[in-house]
Image (spheres, rainbow, N blue to C red):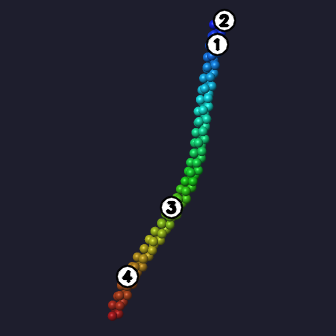
Amino acid sequence: MASQGAQLQNYNNELVKCIEDLREKREEINRTLASDEQEKAKIQNDLAILTRRLAHLNEKLSRQIASRNEYDRTIQETEAAYSKILESSQTLLTVLKRETVNIAKKRQSSS
């Protein structure tokens, strides 16, 4: 009977040890969970900050693109107008030269 009692005590000791091991593993998982939850919260906060920054940059880029497009339009219109001025100046110069020649011919024929 003493041997059965000793064997029962061994089983009891092993059972207590297994339960303690299970509790330690559970606590280790709890610590890992807490750490992972903290990291998750930090990442979510960082993500929110980055999302706001991205939205701000997208708005800024949109304004800059619109501004650049306005400059492009103004440059194109100005270059087109300048080209017309050059054409008009050339036409005016041609007319002026022709009139100068005509006046000179009239002066020569009247002399």
Residue 54 locus on image (x, y percent):
56, 50
The numbered mark, 3 or 4, whose residue comes first in the sequence reads 3
Q: Amino acid at mark 3?
A: Arg
Report the amino acid beneath label 1: Gln
Q: On the rendered structure, is 49 left or right of 81?
A: right
> Residue under circle 4?
97
Residue receiving disc 3: 68
Secondary structure category for the residue under label 4: helix
N-terminal of the two: label 4 or label 1? 1
The percent position of residue 63, horizontal first and vertical second, equals 55, 59
Name the quadrant of the C terminus: bottom left
Is residue 77 placed above or below 45 in the rendered structure? below
Neighbor class of circle 1 (other Cα within 10 Å; few <14, some 14-19, many 20+) is: few
Q: Nearer the viewer, mark 4 or mark 1?
A: 1
Instruction: Count neighbours of disc 4 (C-alpha within 10 A) and say few if under 14, some if 14 to 19, many if 20 or more.
Output: few
Label at residue 65: none
Residue at horizontal 55 percent and vertical 53 percent from the top: 57
Residue at 49% in and 63% down: 72
**Cα separation between marks 2 and 3:** 97 Å
Instruction: Tell which tag, 2 or 3, sits nearer the viewer.
Output: 2
Q: Determine the image quadrant of residue 10.
A: top right
Identify the mark nearer the N-term, 4 or 2.
2
User: Element under label 2?
Assistant: loop
Q: Residue at x 63, y 7 (%)?
A: 3
- Contact, mark 2 vs mark 3 (Cβ under 8 Å): no
